[in-house]
Image (cartoon, rainbow, N blue to C red):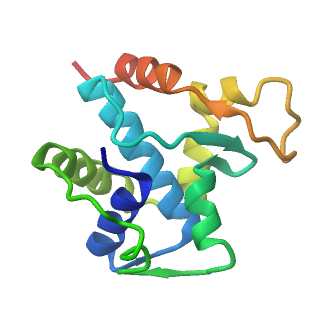
Amino acid sequence: MITVFDVANYILQKLGKCTPMKLQKLTYYSQAWALAWDDEPLFDEDFQAWANGPVCAELFREHEGHFRLPSGFFDSKAKESLSNEQIETIDIVLKDYSPMRPHELSDLSHREYPWQQARRNIPAGMPCDNIIEKEIIRDYYAGVMPD
């Protein structure tokens, strides 16, 4: 199975460069829509309900302290090739979400149930490492798919 680094690496190849926040949200939405459309995750790593939206801790540890991530940033961590179906999913996500600015993606995730559910009873702006469950992500995005 591919990892979050394989997806992040592909996204950076497509965009050329990206802020860490935007990359986090684009990997999250790639995972979310793969779960909704294919009923299976792109990768095993989880997202946590951080104050600024969904964050994959493993990905964060690799880019922590960087303001911009260039293409190739995760070359040493990306090991697997993406399938045509995985590329198609990520490309659709990039087409729909990459024009948005990082804070817009963060705001969008804050309005959606999976992040809200994982942060239940956590005050706004406070740290949180609660996992956003894949089943909740799948069910939510499958429920908002256009007919």
* Position in image of residue 89 (x %, y %): 23, 44
* Position in image of residue 2 (x %, y %): 32, 50
> Could you tell whether 118 is left or right of 99 in the image?
right
Above or below, 77 relative to 69 = above
Above or below, 74 relative to 8 = below
> Could you tell whether 81 is left or right of 48 in the image?
left
> Could you tell whether 147 is left or right of 66 in the image?
left
Most distant residue in the left direction = 84
**115 or 74, nearer to the observer:** 74
Q: Quadrant of residue 70?
A: bottom left
Q: Residue at x 36, y 34 (%)?
A: 41
Above or below, 79 relative to 34 = below
Q: In what quadrant of the picture does the N terminus appear? A: top left
Q: Residue at x 80, y 41 (%)?
A: 128
* Position in image of residue 69 (x %, y %): 49, 79
**104 or 114, nearer to the observer:** 114
Q: Residue at x 65, y 33 (%)?
A: 131
Above or below, 67 relative to 31 = below
Q: In what quadrant of the picture does the C terminus appear? A: top left
* Position in image of residue 38 (x %, y %): 24, 27
